[in-house]
Image (tube, grey):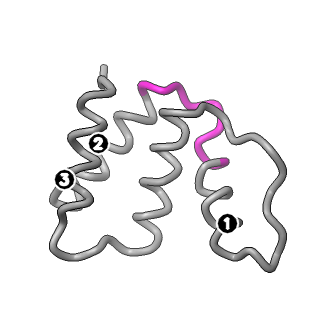
């Protein structure tokens, strides 16, 4: 079971990485973080011209149905894989 404090610590470590993670990894981290803190994706998907917003929404929507604890664990595991 992962705690919110462990998620915060992992977030700080990711933000302190010397080399930024790939775009795919950043989107996966975003999806896990949003799912852990806000639950399932809400609202409508951004339009085609909002490429960044659409990618972020899709990453969050991939985590739909995941519990907050599972999302925190996913974030922490990916952060550890990235060396954070």
Mark 2 vs 3, N-terminal side: 3
Q: Which region of the structure is painted magenta?
A: 61-69
The quarter of the displayed image where residue 22 is located? bottom left
- The percent coordinates of residue 35 (x first, y second) are 54, 38
Q: Which mark is residue 76?
A: 2
- The percent coordinates of residue 82 (x first, y second) are 23, 61
- The percent coordinates of residue 6 (x first, y second) are 24, 32
* Residue 83 drawn above or below residue 62: below
**In the visual, does 76 lie left or right of 50?**
left
Please give the residue where the numbered disc 3 appears in the rendered image. 13
Q: Quick check: is 45 in the magenta stretch?
A: no
At x 66%, y 35%, the residue is: 40
Mark 1 vs 2, N-terminal side: 1
Q: Local crowd at mark 1 within 10 Å, few (<14), some, or many (≥20)?
A: some
At x 59%, y 56%, the residue is: 59
Give the mark toward the camera: 2 or 3: 3
């Amino acid at each position: 079971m992962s705690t919110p404090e462990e998620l915060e610590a992992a977030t700080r470590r990711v933000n302190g990485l010397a080399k930024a993670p790939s775009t795919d990894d950043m989107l996966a981290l975003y999806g896990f973080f949003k799912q852990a803190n806000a639950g399932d994706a809400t609202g409508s998907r951004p339009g085609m011209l909002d490429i960044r917003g659409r990618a972020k929404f899709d990453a969050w929507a991939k985590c739909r149905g995941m519990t907050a604890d599972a999302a925190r664990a996913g974030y922490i595991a990916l952060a550890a894989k990235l060396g954070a």
